Amino acid sequence: MKRRPETDKLESRLLNLGRSIQSQFTKRGFGTITFGILFGFYALFVIDYLTDIPYVIRVSICAIGLVYAVIYFNKYYLSKARVQLSAEAVSLKVEQQNPGLQSRLISMLQFQSVKRLPAGVSENLVEGMVDQAIDQVNDIRMADIIDNSWFKKHFKRITLTLLVIAATVYLAPNYTFAYLQRFIDPSAEYPTRTQ
């Protein structure tokens, strides 16, 4: 069966879409890790202020938290971003989002990838199916399979955390400075209230 130029264009679109899906894992991972680090750092500030955590434990908690963040990012996001999605894999995602395609997209890619059709398969029937698939694909927005809802969620979380941190820095700059200093100087103390 002769390969059609529309198939090459479609495969290129699908591969580009696959790269976009891969980059979403990295972006989502950075959002998750950024929120986790900011929230963890602020939570440690509150706990340290209330309980006066010893220096070694305070630094250990930060080191363990950062190592955990790197491992978590690698395991749940970066490993998925490294897997290159084939045109077939992306076409299955497109079909899942658009059930009206009725497996025509994946079938088209598979039939167009073979030089000869299996015995008993009508070339006219396959050509008709390829025509239908091309017509249907032109009418859908394939980029809709990319889930961007995580962005709003992470943006809200990170913004809220940054606002709380900024308010703390503004309202209690001495305490914030002392907290940061306590990571460098084991003998640093929080300011005391004097009457």
Image (tube, rainbow, N blue to C red):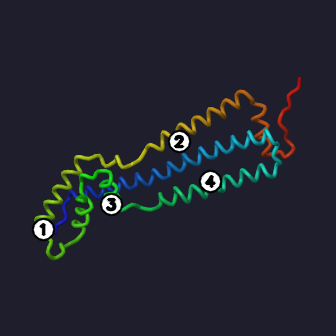
Residue 71, horizontal then vertical, whole percent: 61, 58
Q: Of the two numbered discs 2 and 3 on the same chain, state the one appearing first in sequence.
A: 3
Question: Given the image, on which type of amino acid does mark 3 rest?
Answer: Ala
Question: Given the image, on which type of amino acid does mark 1 rest?
Answer: Glu
Between disc 2 and disc 3, the foreground one is: 2
Give the class, few, some or many, for how many residues have Cα within 10 Å of label 2's Cα (few <14, many ≥20): some
Please report the residue visible at 78 percent of the width from the left and 45 percent of the height from the top: 183
Against 36, is 173 above or below? above
Question: Given the image, on which type of amino acid does mark 2 rest?
Answer: His
Q: Work out how far the residue at label 2 is from the one at label 4, CA to CA, in angstroms.
A: 16 Å
Q: Work out how far the residue at label 2 is from the one at label 3, CA to CA, in angstroms.
A: 29 Å
Which image quadrant is residue 8 in? Answer: bottom left
Give the structural element (helix, strand or loop) at label 2.
helix
Q: Work out how far the residue at label 1 is from the one at label 4, CA to CA, in angstroms.
A: 54 Å
Q: Work out how far the residue at label 3 is from the one at label 4, CA to CA, in angstroms.
A: 32 Å
Q: Of the two numbered discs 2 and 1 on the same chain, state the one appearing first in sequence.
A: 1
Q: Residue 154 has which mark? A: 2
Q: Residue 37 has which mark? A: none
Give the structural element (helix, strand or loop) at label 4.
helix
List the residue tagged with mark 3. Answer: 87
List the residue tagged with mark 4. Answer: 69
Give the structural element (helix, strand or loop) at label 3.
helix
List the residue tagged with mark 1. Answer: 123
